[in-house]
Image (tube, rainbow, N blue to C red):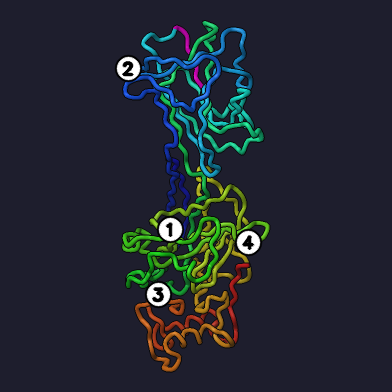
């Protein structure tokens, strides 16, 4: 498991972010089946065929000769190798473990076995577009030795195959020899970009507690399926259709309960209006953005590079990073952006893109029409949308117990007048004084 940690300060508290890349076993060869020696049929080798040998645990392994005197050990020349093809995935890292089998009579001189993941041409016996120095090697021992690898780029040789290459080194004492194998294991680790960060929704923010209200969730109104696809938001790069569970919604995390669904977007560095990948996620009361399983880390199926990042909410104005940021893989550290923090390190694109209140930055609420503009008068306007939602005639009417765009303060009710009404939120967002003013979303 790869463990990364990043820290940030929010609302006077130090919070820690953990993210992990889970491994998946994709290949295992233990050279023994039912107590008898075996060799998977897809192995390809040079020289004589591997022969059975007793391993250090009393089971079976295989032995392969290495070059006799006069032949080179240069891995780019013909050698005594074993090669097994593997599926290639550009979005994972590969990890190979080799356990060497020491026979009952230990050799008088050490023999060495090497392993690597590479593109390899079995016709010529040469690796392609990959440095074998990235492999692992050790003298023969019963203990496994392990090496991790980034994914090699696609090979230029159309005859090359992707897989695990095992080869040996002759003894400097005897001039020839062999290597013995008890087990070869290959695992993959996610190589996807992992986002961590925070955002605060102005409609639900309580200045006294410095946290957002989770009223929608407490009333059972937050849906189990993300709402953005149905609202017409485009989905690209694997986003859309995310679901969560009642367990996640009912959990009171150290960061609080789930407030609502939010949306993350990766955008092109060359054209920030172009979506590259989208993900729907959840936000907790202190602003942490978490996955649909409650984990602090959102995975994207994109390669290493520079991207703009935007965070959106269905009835708030979204924001985007002020400049591109470099997206690493999990092994390079957690990629973070704290939209809830107003300092210059987390600046956002455009003019007054967030509502800055002291040491926090909030998304502007009041976008009841889902049109990237908050306005109180004119056609169309968000105030009239709220009035229309409650019937359009009696301003004191209230709609309660529904998950609606017009509920811009996220309290589970649509109200036009009275305490905690949604109309006042619209007025406050445009400035609270000039009713003809407008607030425009700053995301391209």
In the rendered image, which quarter is residue 58 located in? top left
**Secondary element at image label 2:** loop
| Image spot of residue 343 (x, y percent) | 55, 62
Q: Give the range drawn in magenta.
A: 108-114
- Give the camera-side residue of 129 and 209: 129
Q: In the rendering, at what x and y percent does residue 336 appear? A: 52, 54
Taking the spot 62% from the left edge, 8% from the top edge, the residue there is: 70
Mark earlier in primary sequence (3, 2): 2
User: What SS does tag 1 mark?
Assistant: strand
The residue under label 3 is: 403
C-alpha gap between disc 3 and disc 2: 65 Å
Residue to which mark 2 is pinned: 58
**Residue at left offset 51%, top offset 56%:** 238
Q: Is residue 89 magenta?
A: no
Please say whether residue 51 is visible from this viewpoint.
Answer: yes
Q: Name the residue under label 4.
A: 274
Q: In this view, does 192 lie above or below 31?
A: below
Q: Farthest residue in the right direction?
A: 270
């Amino acid at each position: 498991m790869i463990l990364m940690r990043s820290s940030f300060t929010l609302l006077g508290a130090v919070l820690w972010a953990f993210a992990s890349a889970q491994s998946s076993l994709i290949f295992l060869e233990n050279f023994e089946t039912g107590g008898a020696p075996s060799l998977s049929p897809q192995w390809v080798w040079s020289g004589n065929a591997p022969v059975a040998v007793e391993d250090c645990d009393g089971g079976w392994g295989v032995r392969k000769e290495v070059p006799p005197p006069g032949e080179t050990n240069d891995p780019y020349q013909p050698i005594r190798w074993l090669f097994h093809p593997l599926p290639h995935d550009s979005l994972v890292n590969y990890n190979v473990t080799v356990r060497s089998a020491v026979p009952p009579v230990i050799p008088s001189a050490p023999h060495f076995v090497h392993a690597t993941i590479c593109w390899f041409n079995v016709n010529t016996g040469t690796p392609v577009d990959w440095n074998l120095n990235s492999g692992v090697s050790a003298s023969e021992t019963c203990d496994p030795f392990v090496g991790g690898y980034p994914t090699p780029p696609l090979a230029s040789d159309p005859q090359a195959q992707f897989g695990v290459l095992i080869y040996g080194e002759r003894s400097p004492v005897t001039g020839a020899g062999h290597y013995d194998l008890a087990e070869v294991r290959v695992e993959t680790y996610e190589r996807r970009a992992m986002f961590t960060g925070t955002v605060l929704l102005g409609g639900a923010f309580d200045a006294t507690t410095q946290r957002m209200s989770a009223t929608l969730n407490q009333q059972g109104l937050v849906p189990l399926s993300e709402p953005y696809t149905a609202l017409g938001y485009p989905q690209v790069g694997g986003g859309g259709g995310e679901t969560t569970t009642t367990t996640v919604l009912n959990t009171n995390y150290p960061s609080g309960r789930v407030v609502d669904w939010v949306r993350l977007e990766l955008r092109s560095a060359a054209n920030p209006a172009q979506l590259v990948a989208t993900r729907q996620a959840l936000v907790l009361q202190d602003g942490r953005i978490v996955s649909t399983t409650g984990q602090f880390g959102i995975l994207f199926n994109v390669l290493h590079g520079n991207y703009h990042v935007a965070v959106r909410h269905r009835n708030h104005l979204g924001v985007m990073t002020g400049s591109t940021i470099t997206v690493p893989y999990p092994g390079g550290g957690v990629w973070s952006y704290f939209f809830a923090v107003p300092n210059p390190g987390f600046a956002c694109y455009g003019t007054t893109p967030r509502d800055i209140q002291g040491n926090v930055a909030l998304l502007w609420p009041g976008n009841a029409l889902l049109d990237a503009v908050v306005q109180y008068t004119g056609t169309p306007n968000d105030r009239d949308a709220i009035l229309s939602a409650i019937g359009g005639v009696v301003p004191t009417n209230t709609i309660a117990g529904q998950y609606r765009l017009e509920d811009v303060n996220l309290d589970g009710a649509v109200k036009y007048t009275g305490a905690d009404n949604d109309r006042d939120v619209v007025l406050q967002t445009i400035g609270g004084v000039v009713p003809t003013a407008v607030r425009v979303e700053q995301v391209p």
